[in-house]
Image (cartoon, rainbow, N blue to C red):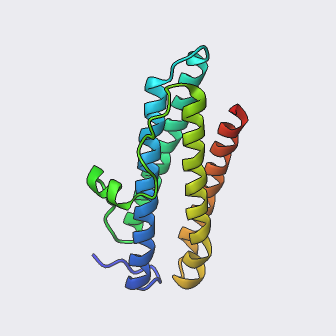
Amino acid sequence: MNTSIGITDGNRLAVATELGKLLADEFLLYTKTRNAHWNVEGPDFHSMHLFFESQYEALDDIMDGVAERIRMLGHYSPATLKEFLQLTHLTEKSGSANNSAGFIKELLEDHESIIVFIRENINPFASKYNDAGTSDYITGLMEQHEKFAWMLRAHL
């Protein structure tokens, strides 16, 4: 069925393409946060285990929202590990020690990278692609990532 929401096919495709990259970044960050939850060691294990769990649960909701936003635009979401690894701006685990400080530093860098990517797309989505809805949506995501980053930064 045709998606007729007042945005041209080309503009919907352009926005969905960028959202696919964001979804890949979110998935990789989710996986790295799960890794931190599973593998953190040290005297702060329990508190950090719970902290990372709260973060990956929130990231799970974010991923679902981004994928659904792509579908609202009439496109299919990338959904394979191969696609995610091809689309992401992030890198897999760096190999730092399995302590909270190492995980926090790496996750913070990833959140900040996602914040920059989102910030770069807010205005183009609204003005260039005539998609104020997605622009507004990713502004909210940016604010969530800013909060994640603040919480991670506060641990360092």
- Residue drawn at x 45%, y 79% is 5
Image spot of residue 33 (x, y percent):
48, 36
Residue 96 to residue 44: above or below: below
Q: Is residue 112 left or right of residue 85?
A: right
Q: Is residue 82 visible?
A: yes
Left or right of 42, for residue 19: left
Q: Position of residue 131 (x, y in %)?
A: 53, 77
Can residue 80 be seen here?
no
**Which residue is located at x 39 percent, y 81 percent?**
4
* Left or right side of 149 for 53: left
Which residue sits at x=50%, y=44%? 59
Q: Quadrant of residue 138?
A: bottom right
From the viewer's perspective, is residue 86 above or below residue 6?
above
Q: Quadrant of residue 142?
A: bottom right
The percent position of residue 9, horizontal first and vertical second, equals 38, 83
Horizontal side, residue 139 vs residue 78: left or right:
right
Query: Which residue is pictured at 41% across the width and 48% down the height?
Result: 27
User: Where residue 72 sits in the image (x, y, percent)?
Assistant: 41, 67
In depth, the one of 86 and 69 nearer the eye is: 86
